Image (cartoon, helix red, strand yellow):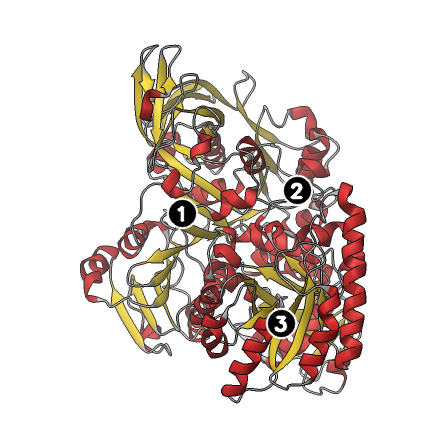
Amino acid sequence: MYSIGKVNEIVGGMAIRIPNSDQQISELVYDSRKISLPEESLFFALSATRDGHEFIADAYNQGIRSFIISKDVPFLMDKTDVNVLKIHDTLKALQDLAAYHRKQFHFPIIGITGSNGKSIVKAWLTQMLSIDKKVYQSPKSYNSQIGVALSLWNLQGHYDLAIIEAGISEPGEMDALAAMIKPDIGVFTNLGIAHAQHFKSKEEKLAEKLKLFKQSNLLIAGSFYVAKEMVENKPLFSWGYLEQDDLQLLEQQQVGQETQLDIQYKGSIHQLKIPFTDKASIENVVSCVAIMLNLQYDIANIQKRIYGLKPLEMRLQLKKGINNSSIIDDSYSNDLASLKISLDFLQQQNQYQKKSIILSEMDGLEENEKFQKKLSEILNGQSLKRLIWVGKDYDFLSALHIPEKLFYPTTASLLEDLHTISIEKESVLIKGARIFQFEKVVERLTLRSHGTVLDINLNALTNNLMVYRSLIPPQVKLMTMVKAFSYGSGSFEVANLLQFAKVDYLTVAFADEGVELRSAGITLPIMVLSPDADTFSALIKHDLEPEVYSMSFLNDFIAFLKDQHIKSYKIHLKLDTGMHRLGFFPEEIPVVIDRLKSQDQVVVQSFFTHLVASGDPKQDEFTQYQIDTYSQSAKLLEDGLGYNFIRHVANTSGIVRWPDAHFDMVRLGIGLYGVDMDRKLENLEQVSTLRTTVTQLKDLKAGETVGYDRKGVLHRDSKIATVKIGYADGYNRRFGQSVGKMQINGKLVPTVGSICMDMCMLDVTDIDVKEGDEVLVFPDLMQASKDIGTIPYELLVNISGRVKRVYYYE
């Protein structure tokens, strides 16, 4: 904790006003939506896709009184109770403060980077070392320019060592991370294809990543990724298959679900038993072994700790729980930094008013009163209705401002009593250290389903939203489409994120979709595309704004509102400029104006049209005709009504290809979910991953048949895998007869025979596969849609509701 006066000294800012130079700063904030201790917070107005200066008023209204800005903010000028520092680069100020804080600690800092495996190595290493050391690990995937700074800020003196993850996506980014972390020990996991589009070559990307270790005393890396000659004047501990490697891998053999690995270290040969068989996990374990050896652990001790390793879900997951509850599973680690992240996610959930937490004891809590005070402040600031605590019962827990508190000494005692605790219609965060095995609690509280799961990456959804936001001017509003179950991705789960991201409008197809969102606590304006007279009452009751597309509908709605004595209800007028689906023709606009001027029941909130082929260059002439026609009608409507309204034309492709048609608002649809129909945006990320598992393997002879009507004729001796997905789950029957391709262990395999209702069969003759292996159903969504002559939209929206959705946040 530093005073704001000391912060000013550290970052070298220009003090605009410091009426309270002694104010103590313990929290660094850059997002006005994530404020827990305003009286101890310092707000950094970062300039990114959204300019942080625009949210200073929000931060002030929530109690923050210290700010670092890079440009004048009129809102602050007449405030006499705020500390204001001005500096050219607010991000650098944040990083400089984090770097200064890091220098105050002299225990070893381990810095990890690489294309893949960073978070796994960090988590496994923490697990192995925590048996006899107090270990700090950077939370989640906080490895970015901002994330690393926030990670370092949470360092405290009671730790024995810290493990900090660093990630880059473009050239020039590692210098700032290296200056902050200054790792004593460097770990390079591997070199893969992630972010390859931003680098000229693999060598350039490797050189950028290795900058992290320029001040390290030691670098640990696989020799097939980093050769000794690549590291100038730097001790390199290499592992690999070369005789000169410090840790040489000799032979490996798969035995059941384990791998026996013979290694040579300092002239002696040892055998390690690793509880994994896949290449990535083996490499990650070997990285941990190499680090442990350099921390002076012996092989026998390391082997004992390896036995405790398990596959980790390195992500926070939102799952459907029992009794209409939402379960947030974050059961693999527990520390203050990651707890704050998890609680932020809990507060985004609006579907239930009641919010609870099941929390385990944390390492370092017992002997550190400052730690206890901090935990109390964090929990008291969350409006929690219930705390279920597992671990030692501390006095400070009883003083928490949480109405219901339950205490259990062990996870086993909680599980024994769990059936007596009423968990219903609430959002529950389950947050525990690995040793507490809270995955057993998660299993008891989540709904069961078959082995087919649709994973929905909320980080990717956020990224895609920012990508499209960067393409539109700041004053242009953003409407996002959540119709058709958010293109198969969910309803309130996606809407909660969009509301948190402060989009301006949501759009649904039918009134009942809007009612569901309102029932789940969504307060954003919602436009309904296909209302009818039967839904008028629901529209009014739930404050849903209808699209109005015909004179008969307009008259019926006005009459209904008049009977209800309602005035100035918002509507959205639809113009048909060529889609010929719904909407008024341009020549009808004068009649519409006359009707609207004759009543006071409705007001036009927006006027819009739908572009037919905005993504097709061959249709650009027609698209321009639509835009011109719309513009003429919008001018006529505005002049006739005498007031302004929101104008919007551009859909997802229109946002990309028609910037002159952004007008007052754009409508983002399939692009939000990671499908780039225009193939122009490199930085979109896939949001949904449909996966299933191999249920059974069969060895069949040539001439045998597979599936209904004996359509799958085998022309060779074959190995056939049955997987748990069929047309009732949304896997179209047109994917049968080798048309569909799924992926197992990185290899594409075709379907065999007809697609069944609940299952289908794959030809896995040419690959290594075992029962229980994971199967990616759509390895390439665009290609899959082409294979059956459709579009990605159809594949996404047809994924059945019986397929379990798991929402995760890294």
Residue depth check, mark 3 versus mark 1: number of the one nearer the observer? 3
Dot 2: within a 10 Å radius of its alpha carbon, few (fewer than 14), some, or many (20 or more) residues?
Answer: many
**CA gap, disc 3 to disc 1?**
37 Å
Front residue (pair 218, 625): 625
Q: Is residue 656 above or below residue 267?
A: below
Q: Quadrant of the N terminus?
A: bottom right
Q: Which residue is mark 2?
A: 212
User: What amino acid is found at the position of numbered circle 3 in the picture?
Assistant: Met
Front residue (pair 443, 388): 443
Quadrant of the rendered structure where residue 758 is? top left
Q: Which residue is mark 3?
A: 551
Residue depth check, mark 2 versus mark 1: number of the one nearer the observer? 1
Front residue (pair 734, 377): 734
User: What amino acid is found at the position of numbered circle 1 in the picture?
Assistant: Ser
Residue depth check, mark 3 versus mark 2: number of the one nearer the observer? 3
Instruction: Look at 62% across and 39% down and name the residue there.
Output: 217
Q: Is residue 36 visible?
A: yes
- Element assignment for label 1: loop
**At which x and y percent is residue 153?**
58, 60
**CA gap, disc 2 to disc 1?**
46 Å
User: What amino acid is found at the position of numbered circle 2 in the picture?
Assistant: Leu
447 vs 732, left or right, is: left
- Element assignment for label 3: helix
**At which x and y percent is residue 493?**
47, 60
**At which x and y percent is residue 296?**
45, 36
Instruction: Look at 41% across and 50% down and name the residue there.
Output: 805
Dot 1: within a 10 Å radius of its alpha carbon, few (fewer than 14), some, or many (20 or more) residues?
Answer: some
Q: Which residue is mark 1?
A: 800
**CA gap, disc 3 to disc 2?**
65 Å
Residue furthest bottom as drawn: 565
